[in-house]
Image: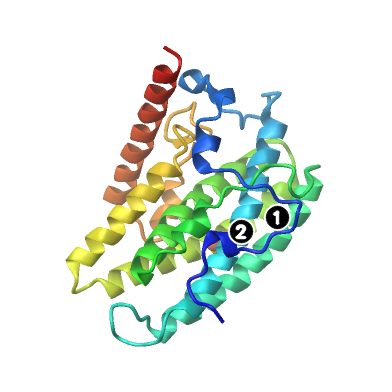
Amino acid sequence: MKRMLTVEDLARDDRFTRIRIEDAIFDPRNANVGKRENAFRAADPESPDAARQLMHSIFVGEIQALEGAGRTCYDFEVGKEREDVPFELKLDMARQCWDEARHVEISVKLTEHMGTEIGQFAEQTLLFEAACNADPVLRLTGVNRALEGLAIDVFNTMRDFGSETSDPVLFFCEDWMLADEVTHVKMGSDWLRKLTATDKERQAQALEFQRTVDKLFSFGGFRGEDEDNPIHLARKFRGMAGFTDDEITELVDIAAEAKRDAEAAYAAANV
Ligand SMILES: [Fe+2]
Ligand SMILES: [Fe+2]
C-alpha cells in the first residue's frame, strides 16, 4: 500500500464539496469580522445555523482525524531513527483511530438530529494536510496539539451551548467527544516532549509548525478569549491535555494576532 497519501487521494463521494481554507476565512460574507457577534448564544437567531455549520465542519474534521491517525500508524517504520516512530506511538494512533471512527458516527447522528444533511456545507482539508507532514513529531504536534486542541475549545463551547438550549443530545455528544479529545491532545503533548527531549532544535520546529496551524485555525477571530469570540479557549481542559500556562497564554496571543490580520485584510480589501 502506498505511503504518504496526499489530500487528493482522500476518498469522498459526490456529496462532499471542497473549499480552500483561504476562501472560508476571507469569505466576503464575513465582512463584519471587526464587529463580529458571538453567534453561540441561545437568544441569537443565527445560532441554530451557526451551530449546524460548525458541527458539520467538525464532522468532516473527524473523518480527516481518522484518516490522519490511520496514516500515522502506517507511514512510519518502528525504530529509533529520526524518520521512525516507537511502536507505542503507533498503538496510541490506533486507539485514536478507534475514537475518531466513533466520533464520525456520533457526528453523523448529531448532524441528522440538528437537521443537516451530509455535504450541506463545504469541506476544507487543512487537518489532513497537517497530517501529511513527513516528520512524525511535526505531524503529531500540528494535528494532535493544534487541531485537536481546537476541537477541545469547540466541544467545550458547544457543550455549554447544548446545555443553554436544553438540548441533551448535543450536550452529551459534545461531552463524550471532549473527553476523547483531551486524551488525543495529551498524546501529542507527551510524544512531542518524549521524542524531542534531547533535540531542542526539532522541538522548536515542531512548536513553530503548531503555531502556524494554530494561527490558521484561529480563523481570524473565531477563537479567542473575548466575549465576542464565538469559540473560547478551554483553559482547564487544555491544562489536562498537557498545555502549560505559558503555552495557553501564547495561544491567546496567536488568536488575537489572527484576528488583527483578518481585520487588516478586510480593511485593505474594502478601501
Ligand atoms: Fe475526534
Ligand atoms: Fe481527536
Nearer the N terminus, badge 2 or badge 1?
A: 2
Q: Position of residue 154 (x, y in %)?
A: 55, 46
Which sits in the foreground, 268 or 91?
268
Report if the CB atoms under discs 2 and 1 are less than 8 Å apart: yes
* Residue at image mark 1: 107
Which sits in the foreground, 186 or 198?
198
* Residue at image mark 2: 62
Which type of secondary structure does the marked residue at label 1 adopt?
helix
Q: Position of residue 197 (x, y in %)?
A: 22, 72
Horizontal side, residue 54 vs residue 6: left or right:
right
Q: Position of residue 238 (x, y in %)?
A: 42, 53
Q: Quadrant of the N terminus?
A: bottom right
Q: Residue at x 42, y 34 (%)?
A: 225
Horizontal side, residue 54 vs residue 229: left or right:
right
- Circle 2 crowding by C-alpha within 10 Å: few under 14, some 14–19, many from 20: many
The answer to whether residue 63 is seen in the rendering is: yes
Amino acid bearing label 1: Ser
Write down the quadrant of residue 52 in the picture: top right
Amino acid bearing label 2: Glu
173 relative to 95, above or below: above
Which type of secondary structure does the marked residue at label 2 adopt?
helix
> Coloured how?
rainbow
110 relative to 99, above or below: above
Q: CA distance from mark 2 to mark 1?
A: 8 Å
245 relative to 98, above or below: above
The answer to whether residue 92 is seen in the rendering is: no
Q: Residue at x 68, y 66 (%)?
A: 102
Q: Residue at x 39, y 19 (%)?
A: 268
- Circle 1 crowding by C-alpha within 10 Å: few under 14, some 14–19, many from 20: many
Q: Position of residue 96 (x, y in %)?
A: 55, 71
For the residue with label 2, is its CB less than 8 Å from the closest atom of ligand 1? yes
